[in-house]
Image (cartoon, rainbow, N blue to C red):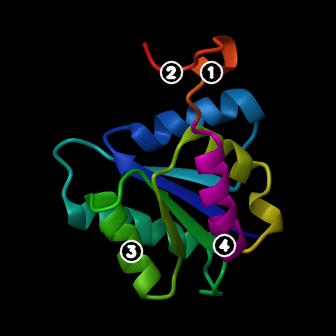
């Protein structure tokens, strides 16, 4: 079974997960790790590492996917450290359409498969929606 870890600055991860749960219901394979104001990177590293240890005690590859908020930020750097150690796959730029899609299939795919799916779902969820309701579309 593949588990998903969502992490990000402030309470972004927990809020995003809570919002996804409003839409899809139970998300037993999805876990949030926030990076609150005032917390240190070492604390975040410990929290993410401990969660991965609980989710994948045998250290099997392809069992954990970390979704981080923004490439270059501390949560993504912590996630990439886990990836470099072979403990997780990582996708940055997590958004609600991505998380909803993955929450529905977390237990049935590998982390690599979910990572590819995450990129597609995240991109597909971004729309200039004005064109759907106005013939001229655009932003105004």
Residue 122 visible to an observer of this rendering: yes
- Who comes first in sequence, dot 4 or dot 3? 3
Report if the CB atoms under discs 4 and 3 are less than 8 Å apart.
no
Q: State the image coordinates of residue 120 (x, y, percent, origin top left).
A: 66, 56
In the image, residue 29 sits, relative to residue 130, either above or below, namely: below
Quick check: marks 2 and 4 in contact, CB under 8 Å? no
User: Which of the marked residues, 1 or 4, is nearer the chain's N terminus?
Assistant: 4
Residue 20, numbered label: none
Tell me the quarter of the picture where residue 72 sits: bottom left
Cβ–Cβ under 8 Å for marks 1 and 2: yes
Numbered tag placed on residue 138 in the rendering: 2
Which residues are drawn in magenta?
111-126
Q: Within 10 Å of the Cα at label 1, are there few (<14), some (14-19), or many (20+) other Cα atoms?
A: few
**Image quadrant of residue 126?**
top right
Q: Residue at x 66, y 14 (%)?
A: 135
Residue underneath mark 4: 111
């Amino acid at each position: 079974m593949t588990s998903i870890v969502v992490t990000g600055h402030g309470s972004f991860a927990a809020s995003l997960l809570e919002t996804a749960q409003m839409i899809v219901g139970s998300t037993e394979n999805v876990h949030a790790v926030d990076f609150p104001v005032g917390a240190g990177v070492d604390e975040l590293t410990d929290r993410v590492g401990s969660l991965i240890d609980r989710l994948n005690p045998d250290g099997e590859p392809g069992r954990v996917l970390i979704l981080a908020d923004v490439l270059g930020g501390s949560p993504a750097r912590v996630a990439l450290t886990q990836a470099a150690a072979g403990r997780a796959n990582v996708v940055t730029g997590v958004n609600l359409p991505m998380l909803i899609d993955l929450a529905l299939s977390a237990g049935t795919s590998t982390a690599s498969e979910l990572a590819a799916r995450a990129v597609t779902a995240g991109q597909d969820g971004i729309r200039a929606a004005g064109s759907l309701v106005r013939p001229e579309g655009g932003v105004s």
